[in-house]
Image: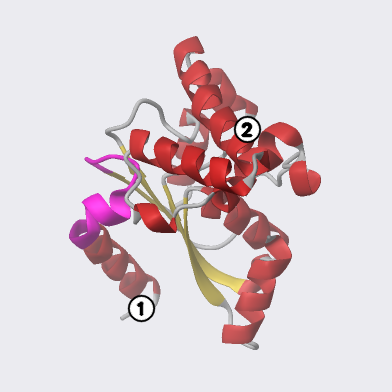
Amino acid sequence: MVAHIGKVVDAVSPQDKVILLAHDWGCVFGYEYAMRNAARVARMIGLDVGDADAQELKDSLSAAQKAMVFAYQIVLAISFICPRFVGDRVARLMATALQAKSIRAKIHAGMSMPYAMRWFGINGGLGNLTPVDPPFPFYYGYATQKPMMFHSPEWLQQLRDNPANTVRSFDCGHWLSVEKADELNSALDTWLQNEAGL
């Protein structure tokens, strides 16, 4: 996944640095690319997922929250290794239960690969992720109306301590780019223009 992101970056901007925008699992893979290839990144925007592999995040979750995370993620991980028809059906049912803002007909079990990587070690697994400590200006937007946060309080404070970063909460669920599209787009446009000195 990191190599794939690198190919996209090199194709769209062979010489200049890029601005990366990522949400959910895209953050996990996008951060990994950005931390390994910081010289290719001018700025980054992460939405609703932060230090996903940090012990501080695990420690910040209650037992009930940990059980909730395990329950939906293991179901999706299983959907990935099931026969295609069964896996697709399971993935769509879980997406409905989680109120995913996607067209149901386009949801398939292959989209559950990151969960299978996490829980079953598929495709090399997700061990030893690079800590997310951006050396470039970073915007982190997160939703507040959900059962748990996907970042630790310590990481959020670390971001806020760096004046090059911006951290903003949005009063909505996990799908903030849909539920708060206008507000998010306006905030990002302002941030990007300020960062560019416009």
Looking at the rendering, in which quadrant would you find the N terminus? Answer: bottom right
Q: Residue 136, position in %: x, y?
A: 55, 63
Q: Residue at x 42, y 31 (%)?
A: 149
Q: Residue 35, position in %: x, y?
A: 67, 57
Q: Amino acid type of disc 1?
A: Gly
Name the residue carrying label 2.
54
Q: Residue at x 52, y 23 (%)?
A: 71
Residue 61, compared with residue 190, is above or below; it is above
Q: Quadrant of residue 76?
A: top right
On screen, residue 193 versus residue 11, left or right, reads: left
Q: Is residue 180 magenta?
A: yes
Q: Residue 49, position in %: x, y?
A: 48, 43
Badge 2 element: loop
Looking at the rendering, in which quadrant would you find the C terminus? Answer: bottom left
Residue 22, compared with residue 74, is above or below; it is below
Give the Cα distance between marks 2 and 1. Answer: 34 Å
Name the residue carrying label 1.
197
Q: Amino acid type of disc 2?
A: Ala
Specify start and end residues of the magenta stretch as a single range: 170-183
Residue 52, compared with residue 110, is above or below; it is above
Q: How many marks?
A: 2
**Residue 132 visible here:** no
Q: Residue at x 59, y 70 (%)?
A: 41
- Closer to the chain start, of discs 2 and 1, is 2
Badge 1 element: loop
Q: Residues within 10 Å of mark 1 (few under 14, many from 20)?
A: few
Q: Is residue 71 or residue 138 the one in the foreground?
A: 71
Q: Quadrant of residue 45?
A: bottom left
